[in-house]
Image: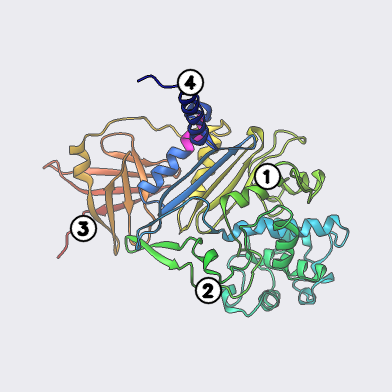
Amino acid sequence: MKKSIIEIIMLYFLFLLLLSACSNGRKNNAEIPQWAQNVDKQVKGWVKSQSVLGAELLIIKDGETIINNVYGWNDNVRQQSLDKNQLYRVHSMTKPFTGTAILMLSEQGKIDLNDRVAKYLDAYKNEKCNEITIRQLLEHTAGFTQPAYPKGSIDLYKNLQEAVTDLTKEGPKYIPGEQYHYSDGHSATLGLIVTEISGMPVERFISDKIFEPLEMNDSYCVLPDADSVRERVCDTYFWKEGKYVKLWDNFAEPETPFFRASGGIATTVNDYAKFLDLWLHKGSSDKVELLSESTVSEALTTNNIHNSYGWHWEIYQPAADKHTLPVFGHGGSSGTLALALPHQNAMIFYFTQSRGTLTANFLPTLILEELGYKEKKSIPEIEVSKAVYDKYLGEFQVSSEIWRVEKTERGLSLKSGRLVPLEFLPVSDSVFVQRFMDMKLEFLLDKKNECNKFIFNIGERAIEAPRYISE
């Protein structure tokens, strides 16, 4: 039976509607740059090899999302997979917000970055801290180290004021202005300055003056108790005794009982993208301007003390000239990373909640290699037979620890009670190398063609690991 013209037209519009729905917010692989596809492939591989429990990857180029994928688990005990745009605790990725708050106050003429901190905080009025400047805090050259606090953890203090006061009693370990030493104490002090100058807690300043104008409605300095928010927050895990163990549950109280300014923000990849986009476009977005171009350029310029850190931003590749911005961003200690690529007009967000993972350190190297900024590590693509792999699998002993060798999709994974799984790729039938670190596994065969030990090379050290034999 022939269809009527009306039916054909309706089917045609239905087809267009379905086509639009399928393509909305997505790109065909042919439209996605190869470097972005390779990053996505690597993130997927890290989850498969258990280098992280789960991960979300967002890549935005020319203002459009070209990749937004999630892999793995949010909660592997309750078998809850990771969903897109969940809330992550980004830890030290809070620092750029605190730095931005300070720069906003500077542009308003309320502070001078060359001012001594003691001008604003009484706790700094002592012989040890009196000469420290705000600029030194921004650059991490004020002399404090990590861990910053005399008690060992900021969690042991009642509030930010108490923590900073205790910090200043002990004073900086190094002469201010002479060396770079990354320290949460620098950021905590900046947060206290924001509180003192603005007349509002630093967390409220960030929420009112940065989150709200940028419409970062999914971002929190202090997590509310509402179930609707908490159920979207990712649990935090760490590697222990050969498996991921929950470190923090999303309905538990945060470990620190106050906003610490060096960390504390919970946000989504899409919300963090609004903030990084502001910096990528030199202080302004479509709707708001928070900083001037000159301030942004200066904040992303390194000094002669350290060439990889600006004013509370990490610098991964220097700018080509004074008119362009460098590759910049920041990471967090539970495996989160945001990276801006000005020359590509692109941003990358890699969020996990696998504390102790090294993948957030590996990813910038991979990206810089893919874009030609760095020479790629040469690893020949070779095929190793299953029979050869089978000889190497199992448990080996390193001192008092048991290390386990397992097969991955592309090579071998090395696991221990404390070591987050690291993947090694074959360069021969018996030698495997780590893609991003100076590490190598060399498997030795005996006269029976059996593998009873391997040599683990890290840098110039060689550690012998015999096969573990249980009693």
Label 1 or label 2, whichever comes before in sequence order: 2
User: In this view of the protein, can residue 113 be seen by the observer?
Assistant: no
Three-letter amino acid code at disc 1? Asp
The x, y position of residue 246, in whole percent, is 41, 66
**What range is drawn magenta here?**
34-39
User: On the image, numbered disc 2 is attached to which residue?
Assistant: 253
Numbered tag placed on residue 5 in the rendering: 4
Is residue 38 magenta-colored? yes
Q: Main secondary structure of the magenta part?
A: helix
Q: Which element type, helix, strand or loop, lies under badge 3?
A: loop
Q: Which element type, helix, strand or loop, lies under badge 2?
A: loop
Q: Single out the mark in the foreground, 3 or 1.
A: 1
The x, y position of residue 359, in whole percent, is 47, 49
* Alpha carbon separation for disc pair 1 and 2: 31 Å
Label 3 or label 1, whichever comes before in sequence order: 1
* Alpha carbon separation for disc pair 2 and 3: 41 Å
For the residue carrying disc 1, how many other residues have a C-alpha within 10 Å: few (<14), some (14-19), or many (20+)? Answer: many
User: On the image, numbered disc 3 is attached to which residue?
Assistant: 468
